[in-house]
Image (cartoon, helix red, strand yellow):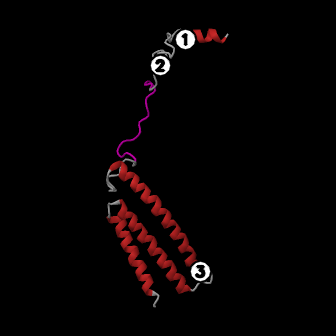
Amino acid sequence: MHAAYPLVLGSLLFAIGIYGVLARRNAITVLMAIELLLNAVTINLIAFGSIIRDEYNIGQAFTLFVITIAAAETGLGLAIVLLIFRQKGTSAIDEQRALAEPTGRRHQPESADTDPLPSPAAAPDDQGEDPAAAPATRAGAAR
């Protein structure tokens, strides 16, 4: 078989995978497109390894790493998509903006005159005592 056939097949799979990642909005379809990308890479690694006739079979060794990464990506990706689908009810990528950073608003530091915590005099004590008398009682008990 001529060496161009696997390279053309790998290139076509890679192009289809790029189209799937960029054009699709369903998370499962995007994961499938990423798998096509990784499979195209493995085909090209094997094809270039057979063309070069490498003594150490580096193409096959890298292919094992790519297959391992693809398996891990599939497991983690599907777990994340299923978790989001259970929570939101959809797997559309455009709908998933809850984890994104807010746009348009910047964090404004709070001014020094506004205190987010209540003052100790305003908060009632746990034992039902007068908050103003509590420090004196505690200080007297420490002697």
- Residue type, label 1: Ala
- Give the residue drawn at x 37%, y 45%: 102
Q: Which is the main secondary structure of the residues drawn in magenta?
A: loop
Which numbered disc flags the more N-terminal residue, 1 or 3?
A: 3
On screen, residue 71 versus residue 22, left or right, reads right
- Give the structural element (helix, strand or loop) at label 1: helix
- Residue type, label 3: Asn
Which numbered disc flags the more N-terminal residue, 3 or 2?
A: 3
- Residue type, label 2: Ser
Instruction: Write down the quadrant of residue 31 in the picture.
Output: bottom left
> Where is residue 55 shown, x and y percent of the image?
62, 84
Is the residue marked by circle 3 packed among few (<14), some (14-19), or many (20+) residues within 10 Å?
some
- Give the residue drawn at x 43%, y 68%: 35
> Where is residue 23 shown, x and y percent of the image?
32, 65
Which numbered disc flags the more N-terminal residue, 1 or 2?
A: 2
* Magenta range: 101-115
- Give the structural element (helix, strand or loop) at label 3: loop
Q: Is residue 95 magenta?
A: no
- Give the residue drawn at x 49%, y 12%: 128
Quick check: marks 3 and 2 in contact, CB under 8 Å?
no
Is the residue marked by circle 2 packed among few (<14), some (14-19), or many (20+) residues within 10 Å?
few
Q: Is residue 114 above or below residue 133?
A: below
Q: Is residue 120 above or below residue 95?
A: above
Query: Which residue, given by chain and number where applicable, does mark 1 sit on?
Result: 134
- Give the residue drawn at x 59%, y 80%: 57
Query: Which residue, given by chain and number where applicable, does mark 2 sit on?
Result: 119
Query: Which residue, given by chain and number where applicable, does mark 3 sit on?
Result: 57
Disc number placed over residue 18 in the picture, else none: none
> Where is residue 94 shown, x and y percent of the image?
32, 55
> In front: 135, or 72?
72
Q: Nearer the viewer, mark 3 or mark 2?
A: 3
